Amino acid sequence: MGMTAADIRLRVEPYPYQREGILYGLDKKRLFIGDEPGLGKTLQSIGIVDTADAYPCLVICPSSLKINWQREWGKFTGKSALVLDNAVRTTWPYLLRMGMHQVAVVNYESLRKYFVWDIKAHSGGSFRLQDVVFCPQIKIFKSVIIDESHRVKDPSAQQTIFTKGIATGKEWVILLSGTPVVNRPEDLVAQLSIMGRLQEFGGRSAFMADYCTDPKDKKAEPAVPLSVLSDTLYANCMIRREKAKVLPQLPDKSRVDLYVDISNGDEYDVAATDLAEYLRLYKECTDWEIRRKMRMEALVKFMTLRQLATLGKVAQAVDFIRTFLDSGKKLIVFCSLHEVVDALCKAFPRAVTVTGRDSASSKQVAVDSFQNNPDVQLIVCSIKAAGVGLTLTASSNVAFVELAWTYADCCQCEDRAHRIGQKDNVTCYYLLGRGTIDQTIYSLIHKKKSIAAEIMNSDDDIPTDEMYFDELVASFLNFSDD
């Protein structure tokens, strides 16, 4: 008996195309969701698993997206997702069996740590699936979601082998990837194998013989036209929609909050405790003049804390950006600190920049190449230098590694992409350090949409208005006490 739209009980109302994706998945069970970034592949895969009641579920994803997955399960279904870490290294099977959590979330790099008991080593260090001894607890998962599945396209890579072993024999296997796959058919071999569908294409060697050509021979045509491969995929196991096609269903702009764990938590905590103590003294102080001085001192401490939170996010920001660029789409990244710009440029040498350190002419060259050159996928902008006046409509995706202080400034940055001339819905990703001042500022920005830039001291981007400051203090202290 097939499932119908009435069976979908998500806590949010899916767009019509998302409902179609969920129903397609309920019918196919082992499939690719290949929608472009920003169309809600996460929601669709959660909808499939939840409607099928295929719990416990395992989500394998890039490390920068783990917390996002955990939050989305709660938001869309009310189910509890456990992010695997050292604290639950041995107890996770028990926690799932007892029903304390219905979902486990793990990043690719940790598959071995949590699910592999032993690897029977060969000389040379390479191994195959039959050499891997998995822990028997992987049997408790009824479904597996593999996010950004182009990460497992190399059949000989360890993560591919582990993913294949975990997914083998599962009734529900959902691969998510915004990467158009059909132009490099060999990338599909490992992913179809993980999905348990390679045999439908005659197995590995038949697939290679039919659809793949020698990469050195640029003019070679595959034995079977790629349109046939495409048709077969869509008929059997793949659904893919482009933003342009479903635009009428989408809002002009959508925001995605991506919480990440910072890498310098201990250092951050020391500074946060110090600031909280100082703010308690400030609140008790009644002398106006001393209070004003304390406020300036506290603002310096706020800035330091923000810098720590931002620097702690860089590794996860690199992971997120790399994951995103793999989809073949362009991305605009906003930040403020020079160290962050430098770290991103080091990680992505082909990126162009628009920052306070760039001359007017080099900014223009950067913008032109981002707008017109398909090979330039990433532009790194400083919030101050690029917040106004630029048109970056070659991308409909914007990511903030750092926040501006006000809602108005965030909107100005977002609207570099969302201009007349941008036909797409714009997706804005906010990378927020979990449990840090990022969360305080972000909630304050949204609470204070009406407070525009008047309260900003135009010299230094710091809110010096006492009312805003007291609000910042109150929400920071509340947050620290939670």
Image: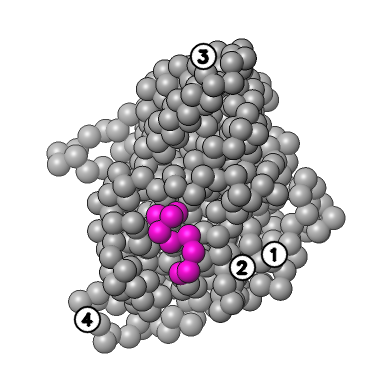
At 37% across and 71% down in the image, what residue appears? 367
Q: Amino acid at mark 2?
A: Asn
Cβ atoms at labels 4 and 1 below 8 Å apart: no
Q: Amino acid at mark 3?
A: Glu
Which residue is identified by label 4?
A: 217
Residue 384, image x, y percentages: 43, 55
Which residue is identified by label 1?
A: 251
Front disc: 4 or 1:
1
Residue nearest the observer in this picture, 363 or 29: 363
Which residue is identified by label 2?
A: 425
Quarter of the image that includes the N terminus:
bottom right
Q: Answer left or right for 53 relative to 439.
A: right
Q: Amino acid at mark 4?
A: Asp
Which residue is identified by label 3?
A: 277
- Disc 4 is placed on an element classified as loop
Point out the tag, 3 or 2, that comes first from the N-terminus.
3
Picture quadrant of residue 32: bottom right
Point out the tag, 1 or 2, that comes first from the N-terminus.
1
Q: Amino acid at mark 1?
A: Pro
Answer whether residue 435 is visible to the viewer in this image: yes
Q: Which mark is residue 259?
A: none
At 66% across and 72% down in the image, what residue appears? 247
Front disc: 2 or 4:
2
* Mark 2 and mark 4: Cα distance apart in space: 39 Å
Point out the tag, 3 or 4, that comes first from the N-terminus.
4
Residue nearest the observer in this picture, 455 or 399: 455
